[in-house]
Amino acid sequence: MEKEIVAKQAYLDILKSNNVNLPTWYIDFLVKNESSLNVKITRKRNKFRLYSLSELCENTNPGKLKDYLIIGYENKSYLVLDSRDMETLWIFESSNLTISKTKLKLRDITKKWRRVTWQPVCCHGFWDGQ
């Protein structure tokens, strides 16, 4: 637990030194879900893979566009967070350099993830050789 707190503080220091001020609840969400996270943003698209906290901190410039922070990707499209309000989500299309606002807010995707429940797959008959 102490090691996790030290790592989290190191990540916070890196983000702060790069003028990235993510909401603390989102940082906590990323710490709890350190493995890769895939979220559905729109019905017409594949899921976006959210960057982990360590991935956001890997570079000295963690995926910043002017007024936006890249927090995930899907092929050549990027999920970006509006750094002016740290809540509005946009999709940046690198192929044609367009950006479009989504209907979701940052808090919406963390709520969606928490609602997902994992159910075990039934293996009746498998383990007893039937």
Image: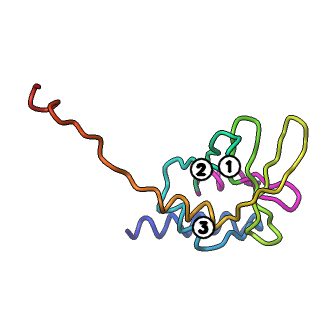
Circle 1/circle 2 CB separation < 8 Å: yes
Q: For residue 2, which quarter of the picture?
A: bottom left
For the C terminus, give its image quadrant.
Answer: top left
Looking at the image, is mark 3 or mark 1 earlier in the sequence? 3
Which residue sits at x=76%, y=51%?
Answer: 63
First to last magenta residue range: 53-70
Q: Amino acid at mark 1?
A: Gly
Which residue sits at x=46%, y=56%?
Answer: 116
Residue 119 percent across, percent down from the top left: 33, 50
Q: Amino acid at mark 3?
A: Tyr
For the N terminus, give its image quadrant.
Answer: bottom left
State the CA–CA distance, disc 3 to disc 2.
14 Å
Labels 1, 2: front one: 2
Residue 17 sits above or below residue 36 on the image? below
Looking at the image, is mark 3 or mark 2 earlier in the sequence? 3
Residue 62 percent across, percent down from the top left: 73, 54
Q: Which residue is mark 1?
A: 72
Q: Which residue is mark 3?
A: 26
Which residue sits at x=83%, y=42%?
Answer: 93
Q: Amino acid at mark 2?
A: Val
Left or right side of 77 for 115:
left
Q: Is residue 52 magenta?
A: no
State the CA–CA distance, disc 1 to disc 2.
9 Å
Q: For residue 27, which quarter of the picture?
A: bottom right
Which residue sits at x=86%, y=62%?
Answer: 67
Q: For numbered disc 2, what is the local secondary structure?
A: strand
Q: Which residue is mark 2?
A: 39
